[in-house]
Image (cartoon, rainbow, N blue to C red):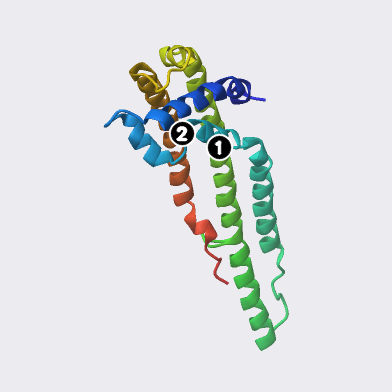
Amino acid sequence: MDRLDQVLDSALPLLRRAEEVLEAAGAPPGHPVWAQLRRVRLMPADAALAVAELRPSALVEAEPELRADARVCVEIAAALPPPDEWEGEAADAYDDLRRRAATHLSGDHDSLDERFEASADLAAALHDWMTRARDNLAAVLAEALTSAEALTLASPASLPPGAAEIEAAAGLTAHILQTVATDYAEAEDLLLGSQQLADPLPL
């Protein structure tokens, strides 16, 4: 259990309250919350729950396993026996195949070992990103729980919501969603930079 797990249950009622106000009255025209809603396309409670679903622990073992696979490729490539005293067309064909197999296993950036290493780098980067995203949201939620907006939204609800409630709900929502959006933009950059991992290796 990390800090986000500890604070999320306490923060969800506040986020749901902010949602109720915005759903009932909307946000002031031109308020920054509109831009954040367009970026995230989720209300604050659902956005927080989406971040809470990130499990960096699931990637802890991926990096060392992928690097171990890369080392196996290098070892196998180095162990492929040359034809030695074997001569003739068959020996030449075998040696050509052996060299191509070795290069496929361990060689340039298109080799299997390099693909494993790049996948390990991505797994490590995603683990770190998930950890940061959870930590960042936890800090923002803890701040929100003691904010002036939280005090305003904790007051007895008025129907329709008053101007102070609307402004508090919009400000709190914008702050939460901006944090989520910023972290998810980083993840998009990571995945965009790793698109080549989805390409098949040339044979």
Secondary structure under the numbered disc 2 in the rendered image: helix
* Amino acid under disc 1: Ala
For the residues bearing labels 2 and 1, Cβ distance under 8 angstroms:
yes
Residue situated in front as seen by the camera: 132 or 68? 132
Quarter that holds the C terminus:
bottom right
Residue at the far front: name it. 159
The kind of secondary structure element at disc 1 is helix
- State the separation of the CA atoms marked 2 and 1: 9 Å
**Disc 2 or 1, which lies upstream in sequence?**
1
Relative height, residue 25 to residue 96 (above, below): above
Picture quadrant of residue 11: top right
Q: Is residue 193 visible?
A: no
Q: Residue at x 47, y 35 (%)?
A: 43
The one of 88 and 166 positioned closer to us in this rendering: 166
As drawn, is 122 to the left or to the right of 174?
Answer: right
| Dot 2 crowding, Cα within 10 Å, few <14, some 14–19, many 20+ | many
Q: Judge whether residue 12 can be spotted in this image.
A: yes
Whole-percent x, y for residue 57 in the image: 66, 36
Q: Is residue 179 above or below residue 41?
A: above
In the image, what residue occupies the spot 55% across and 22% down? 13
Furthest residue in direction bottom, as rendered:
89
Residue kind at label 2, given as amino acid type: Val
Which x, y percent locates residue 93?
Answer: 64, 82
Q: Position of residue 131 (x, y in %)?
A: 56, 32
Near mark 1 (Cα within 10 A), the count class, few <14, some 14-19 or many ≥20, is few
Report the disc number at residue 29: none
Q: Quadrant of the N terminus?
A: top right
Give residue 50's mark: 1
**Image disc number at residue 180:** 2
